[in-house]
Structure formats: C-alpha cells, structure tokens
C-alpha cells in the first residue's frame, strides 16, 4: 500500500523532559536528512536501521541551528507502522517540540490524524483490529489491571482465541459442505449432525465464557460505578473523602455546570472505582434533594456497587430501612460508621437487613475499618472463579455486541439441526457467526468503521 508521510508529536503535550516527533512513510528519511546535521558524515538514510543519532536540526532557509536532538532511525517493515519511521527526540517544552514539528511539516510531511499511526499499522497488516483497539484502551487505561488487560489484548490474546473458534466453525462448515455434496450417504448425514452439534455447542460455550468476562472487562476499563447512600450525617462525604485520599485518585473530573453527577476515579487494590458523587454529596448531603428522585433512581439503577452507610451511634430508622429496600438485589456493602461513639444501633437488626451482603464497621473519624472495607470491595469484585491476569477478557462494547450476535447465530444453527432444518439453512447461520467473529479481529470490516475507530485515538499514536 502507498501512503504519504505523516508526522505528529507522540508524547503527551507539555509534559516530561523529552518530547518525540514521529515521522512515518516513504519520505521519512529524506525529510529528516534535509533537517538533520549529525556528528558523523553519514546521512540518516544510510545509517543502520534501529540506531539512534545525536545532532542538530537546522532551519534550511537560514542554516541556523533550531534544536538539539536525538534521532532514531527505523527502517520498515520492522517498525510499528511497517513503514520507515524516524523519531526525533527533543526537549520537552511546548515551543521546542512544536518548532520541530513545524520544520518537519515544512519539508512535506503531513500532520497525522488522531490514531493514524496505529491505523497504518493495521492497514499494513502489522496488527489486527482488536489489537488496534487495545491501543486505544491502553491510552485510556486507568489502573494497572486495566493496563494489563489492554496489554494482553494487544499481544493478541483475544485475537488468538477468536481465531481458534473461527477455525472450529470452519471445520464444521467443511463437514456441512461434504454433506451437501453427497446427500445420498445417510451415514454421512448422521455423522455430520452429531459432529455439528458437538462442535457448535463447544464454540457456543467458549463464546459464552468469553462474554461472562465482559462485565469484569468493562469494569476494569471504565471503573466500577459506585454510589454511596445513607441518610444525612452518617458519614457519606467522609467515606468518599477517605477513599479518595487513601487511594490514588485516577482522574478528577472538573466539576461541570451542566452535569449533575461528578465522578471521582480511585484505584482500590486494583479495582477502579468510579465514585459517583452528586454535586451535592460534599456540601448539601442529599443526593435525592439535589438531583431529584427520578435522576437519583437512575443513578442507583446504573450502579455496579452500593456503599450503604449507617450510623453506629443512632438507632436504625425507617429511612435506613427504605434505603435497604431501594438497593435490594444489587451488590451492596453495608458500612456501620462512627464506632468511636457510644453504640445505639442494634447490630442484630442490622445483620438481619444485611442478609448476605458484606458488612463492615468503621470509624472514619479515627481512620478505622477502611482497610476492611477495601478488602470487601476487592473480594467482591475478584470473587468466584474469576482470576484477574490469566484470563482473556472482553471489555470493548463493539466486541461484546459482536460476540452476542455470534452466539445468537450459533444457537440458531444448533436448534436448526435439532429441529431437522435443511443443512444449507444451518450453513447460513454458521457462516454468519464465522463472519461476525471475523469482524472482531478486523476481517471483513467496512472502511467507515475503521475510520471511526481510529479517530478515537490521541494524536500521535
Ligand atoms: P454525610 O452527611 O453522610 O455526608 O456525613 P458527613 O461525612 O458529612 O459526616 C457528618 C458528620 O459526622 C461530620 O461532622 C463528620 O466529621 C462526622 N463523622 C464522620 N465519620 C465519623 C466517625 O466515624 N466518627 C465520628 N465521631 N464522627 C464522624
Ligand atoms: Zn456530607
């Protein structure tokens, strides 16, 4: 494939001591050579690939030194884009890196669109689509675990699994083909049905397993959306503050005037919590009062985790009981706070309401019980059979949608066989599921989808 030469700043803007301007394309060496004066006499287009060179960039019009740089030279196809790549390392200041970028653009490079480097890697066959999407996730990864998930996907874990399952479907299709070609052999048909059902059920099972991980995957990526509830004065704000202060706050949204819910990201033992605060929780307490009953119901409904706070030094009230009712059936951790004060609450009653939710006692004032709470959060999330790390997670909503459709097609095929539907109808469903899985890894995808996906990238990736 033929592409023009693109350039962009590929390090975060305005941060760090070093910034990199990256060039990719046929003209990359040529453009760099017109600007670069190194200590050696060799041109960059002549040096060994994958070497780094110290020197200066010259403003060609005036011959003046513009910048002190280190230049990495990487000849395609052993590069991220499979094209010739030059990376110019310069001082990290905004002025300096923009000057370098400008020099390069003046020499005929085109400013890369967001995600265009990764898009080229994809179009040049260096990575498949799910790997490219993982790069997006990596850029946005909010915790180490989310990072590992993205890395695993980038290394092709999901791709390999999908490929394996597609292979299984292909084998079924091959047998079906034989059956269609030789319909006169009854025992071939017998065998095909038997084999088809077995294999199709296996593939369906594997896809469903993968889908089961999607909840965890999504949470790792987007954060466990967590709402703190409780009546006024029990310690909700204190809890929020304590979680935010004791843990690395990941992102703090700038309070918007249009949005009524503010999010705080914290990393609790590898579980990213998206603490949903209302504009009011900190000052005026009451989520319901602040954003209205309907909206708060909505927020509650969308929550993955409820932290329900009670007051140790007050009796259980009707309001407390109503809150328990409102969150019934959800993942709840009950927190009895203010244990430093005299006990007035009846813990037997609390336990009755708590049922099989986790129960933690805290004194946020004395900083007690917060560890236990964090333990409860983490074990709730990582409970059961799900072991983070060595699993293939699906976290991308596009992948999840495709997997669901693929499962549906396989189900159609299975029930078709069971009901004695003609085999060429079954074949259509199988082929469909094979195609749907192909879309996850970028085979048979539309051009427009590709553009849309890659435009989500940061500039320079
Ligand atoms: P909210 O209305 O549920 O958000 O409760 P706040 O977090 O605003 O706390 C209400 C009051 O209780 C504040 O004066 C807190 O300092 C105090 N408070 C919070 N946690 C504790 C605790 O564990 N022990 C005691 N004695 N006071 C607490
Ligand atoms: Zn408060």
Image: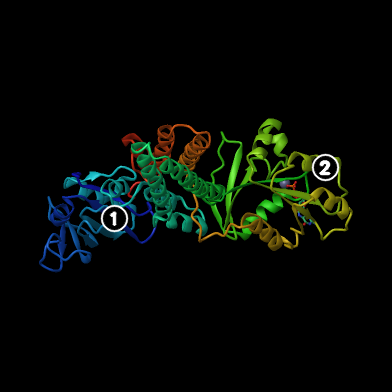
Q: Nearer the viewer, residue 284 or 324?
A: 324
Q: Is mark 1 within 8 Å of ligand 1?
A: no
Position of residue 182 in the picture relative to residue 393 (left or right) = left
What residue sits 61% from the left and 36% below the top? 260
Query: Helix or strand or loop: what does disc 1 sit on?
Result: loop
Query: Helix or strand or loop: what does disc 2 sit on?
Result: helix
Judge whether residue 345 can be spotted in this image: no
Q: How far across and how far down the image is residue 242, in percent?
A: 67, 56
User: Which label is found at residue 80?
Assistant: 1
Which mark is first along the chain, 1 or 2?
1
What residue sits 20% from the left and 55% below the top? 84
Q: How far across and how far down the image is residue 239, in percent?
A: 70, 53
Which residue was labeled with disc 2?
Answer: 321
Q: Residue furthest left?
A: 41
Position of residue 44 in the picture relative to residue 307 (left or right) = left
When the figure is inspected, residue 261 is found, relative to residue 126, above or below; the finding is: above
């Amino acid at each position: 494939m033929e592409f023009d030469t693109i350039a962009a700043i590929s390090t975060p803007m305005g941060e760090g001591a070093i910034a990199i301007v990256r060039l990719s394309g046929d003209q990359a060496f040529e453009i760099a050579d017109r600007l670069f004066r190194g200590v050696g006499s060799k041109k960059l287009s002549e040096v060994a690939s994958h070497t780094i060179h110290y020197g200066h960039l010259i403003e060609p019009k005036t011959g003046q030194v513009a910048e002190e740089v280190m230049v990495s030279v990487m000849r395609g196809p052993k590069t991220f884009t499979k094209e010739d790549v030059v990376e110019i390392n310069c001082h990290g200041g905004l002025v300096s890196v923009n000057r370098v970028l400008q020099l390069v653009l003046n020499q005929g490079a085109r400013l890369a669109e967001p995600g265009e480097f990764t898009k080229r890697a994809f179009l040049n066959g260096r990575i498949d689509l799910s790997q490219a999407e993982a790069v997006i996730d990596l850029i946005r990864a909010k915790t180490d675990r989310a990072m590992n998930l993205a890395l695993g996907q980038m290394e092709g874990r999901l791709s390999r699994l999908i490929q394996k399952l597609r292979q299984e479907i292909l084998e079924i299709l091959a047998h079906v083909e034989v059956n269609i070609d030789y319909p006169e052999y009854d025992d071939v048909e017998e065998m095909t049905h038997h084999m088809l059902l077995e294999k199709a059920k296996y593939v369906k099972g594997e896809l469903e397993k993968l889908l089961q991980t999607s909840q965890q995957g999504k949470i790792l990526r987007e954060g466990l959306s967590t709402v703190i509830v409780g009546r006024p004065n029990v310690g909700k704000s204190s809890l929020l503050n304590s979680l935010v202060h004791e843990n690395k706050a990941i992102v703090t949204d700038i309070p918007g005037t249009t949005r009524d819910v503010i999010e705080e990201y914290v990393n609790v033992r590898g579980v990213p919590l998206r603490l949903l605060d209302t504009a009011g929780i900190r000052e005026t307490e009451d989520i319901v009062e602040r954003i209205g009953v309907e909206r708060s119901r909505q927020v509650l409904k969308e929550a993955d985790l409820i932290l329900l706070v009670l007051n140790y030094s007050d009796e259980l009230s009707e309001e407390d009981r109503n809150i328990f009712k409102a969150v019934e059936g959800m993942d709840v951790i009950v927190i009895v706070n203010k244990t430093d004060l005299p006990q007035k609450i009846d813990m037997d009653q609390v336990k009755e309401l708590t049922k099989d939710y986790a129960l933690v006692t805290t004194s946020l004032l004395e900083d007690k019980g917060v560890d236990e709470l964090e333990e409860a959060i983490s074990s709730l999330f990582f409970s059961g059979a799900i072991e983070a790390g060595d699993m293939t997670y699906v976290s991308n909503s596009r992948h999840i949608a495709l997997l669901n459709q693929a499962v549906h097609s396989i189900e159609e095929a299975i029930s078709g066989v069971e009901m004695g539907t003609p085999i060429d109808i079954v074949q259509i469903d199988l082929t469909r599921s094979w195609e749907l899985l192909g879309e996850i890894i970028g085979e048979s995808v539309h051009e427009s989808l590709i553009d849309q996906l890659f435009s989500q990238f940061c500039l320079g990736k």
